[in-house]
Amino acid sequence: MKKNMGKIDRNVRIIIAAIIVGAAYMDVISGTLEVVLLVLAGIFVLTSVINFCPLYAPFKFSTRKKDKAVQ
């Protein structure tokens, strides 16, 4: 897997996941919506940790900055 997520992308996903988990913990969301959003939060955390978004891959999209060539 080629990394395709930049720092800002990772941080935004982590923040969104934290907000979802916080909302679930404080019973702001419940039921089916809670389960769906918690699964989404888990996916956001997982993709942030591995720096790879499978939805970006088919479109060859990347938010990661290009590595500078070492000379």
Image: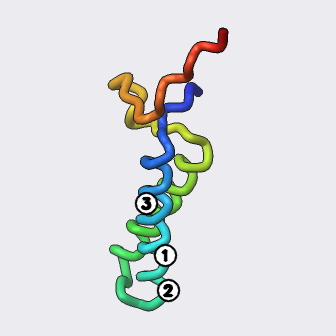
- Mark 2, secondary structure of its residue: helix
Q: Which amino acid does label 2 sit on?
A: Tyr
Q: How far is disc 3 from disc 2 in space, using C-alphas?
A: 15 Å
The 10 Å Cα crowd at callout 1, few under 14, some 14 to 19, many 20 or more, is some
User: Seen in the image, is 20 located left or right of residue 70?
Assistant: left
Q: Which residue is drawn at 34% across and 74% down?
A: 33
Label 3 sits on residue: 40
Q: Total label count?
A: 3
Q: In which quarter of the image is the C terminus?
A: top right
Q: Which amino acid does label 1 sit on?
A: Val
Q: Which residue is drawn at 49% across and 24% down?
A: 66
- Tag 2–tag 1 contact (CB < 8 Å): yes
Q: Where is residue 22 in the image (x, y as percent from the top left)?
A: 47, 81
- Is residue 70 placed above or below 45 in the rendered structure? above
Q: Residue 25 carries which label?
A: 2
| Mark earlier in primary sequence (3, 2) | 2
Q: Which residue is drawn at 49% across and 50% down?
A: 10
- Tag 3–tag 1 contact (CB < 8 Å): no
